[in-house]
Amino acid sequence: MTTIYDVAKIAGVSVSTVSRVLNDSGPVSDETRKKVEEAVAAVGYRPNPSARSLRTQKTDLIALIVPDIINEYFSVISRGVQDVVEQHGYHMLLCNTDGNENAEIDYMQMLENGRVDGFIITPPGPNLNQNADDYLRSLGRADKPFVMIGDRLGETGVCDIVTADTSVGTREAMMHLLESGHSMIAYLGGPEAKSVATNRLKAYKQGLSRRGLSVNKELIYETDLSLQGGYETARRMIDQWRSSPSKSAGSIPTAIFAVNDMVAIGVIMALRDYGLRVPEDVAVVGFDDVPLASFIQPRLTTVAQPKYDLGRLAAERLMLQIADTGEPKRKIILPTRLVVRESTQPRQDVPFL
């Protein structure tokens, strides 16, 4: 195995000079740098990253912690993170937790164990990961370098936060459905105790109230935040309404607002299985605008989040923290926008069940 000593011998320089060239850690003449680089290429030398980490106390690794890598929302975020960290000479570890709290804590502990230089964490999914949230707070108090995408703790000052204005996006989606003539709008969301679900459910209720409509608790469903969760919850909802003895044309939902696109796509699949048409029988709105939203038939009306920019800005804030620039912790809120496609249309006065 070739070593740094082999490189130094071929280049005719000292080991410390080779180290300065490889680590860009000191002044070296252009001629000497060229000799070292040619020697490295000639012997095929590759620095040992573990040894380098011991010397510099840096790993050049950051972790991105997500609950569901299958969800395209997180795939686009990861692209934004990766593009930035690679520009800074870092590599990204993509850590999928499946929403499991113990897995989240294990990945966060990589920072304290010196296995990564920092991490970016997203909302944990439908689970209430209270112990993981407490651990995040302790890392924040210790001024460890990490950034949160989405305000999962519901508080500021813990770390840098990069999030989207989802409450405004929800209000726009509700206004679109209400202006299309829908008054019986079902809501499929996550646990109310989670900040993302709380904010969107609150905006859903506000949209109804502003039109003088009462909130029907029977139209609010808690679901797993996945395609399968949306599919199963929609089937349960349809079965419930079909079997209800008090069912009437004025009490049947004609639209469904889903907490994210994967849930919405699962809803569309369930409606099809029951022979129901979208949007003729029931309108469907999602949230996030994942790539699949514009390919499913009918194409999904949704609220677009700036997913790539969420990842990009989170990575930029993390790089500043790792560089110890003294930048104060910030909360960055990005705008959303409603994207109207074929899964919604003005209501037809024909109940779908």
Image: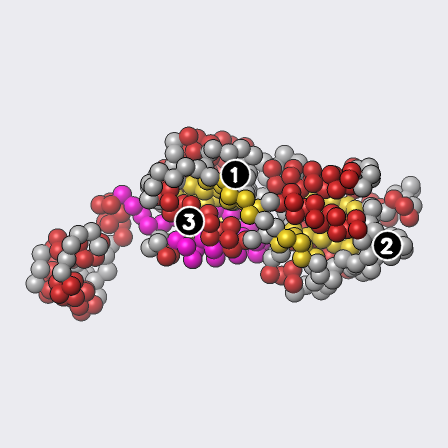
Decide if residue 223 is in sight here.
no
Q: Badge 3 is on which residue?
A: 316
Q: Badge 2 is on which residue?
A: 352
Residue 11 higher or lower than 138, as above or below = below
**In screen coordinates, is 179 left or right of 247?**
left
| Residues at marks 1 and 3 touching, judged by CB atoms closer than 8 Å | no
How far is mark 2 from mark 3, CA to CA? 48 Å
Q: Badge 1 is on which residue?
A: 101
Q: Nearer the viewer, residue 349 or 2?
A: 349
Look at 77% across and 39% down and name the residue there: 210
Mark 1 or mark 2, whichever is nearer to me: 2
Q: Nearer the viewer, residue 265 or 142?
A: 142
Which residues are the magenta region? 57-85
Q: Quadrant of residue 189?
A: top right
Q: Amino acid at mark 1?
A: Glu
Q: Estimate how packed mark 2 is, as few (under 14), some (14 to 19) or many (20 or more) residues with alpha carbons within 10 Å.
A: some
Decide if residue 2 is in sight here.
yes
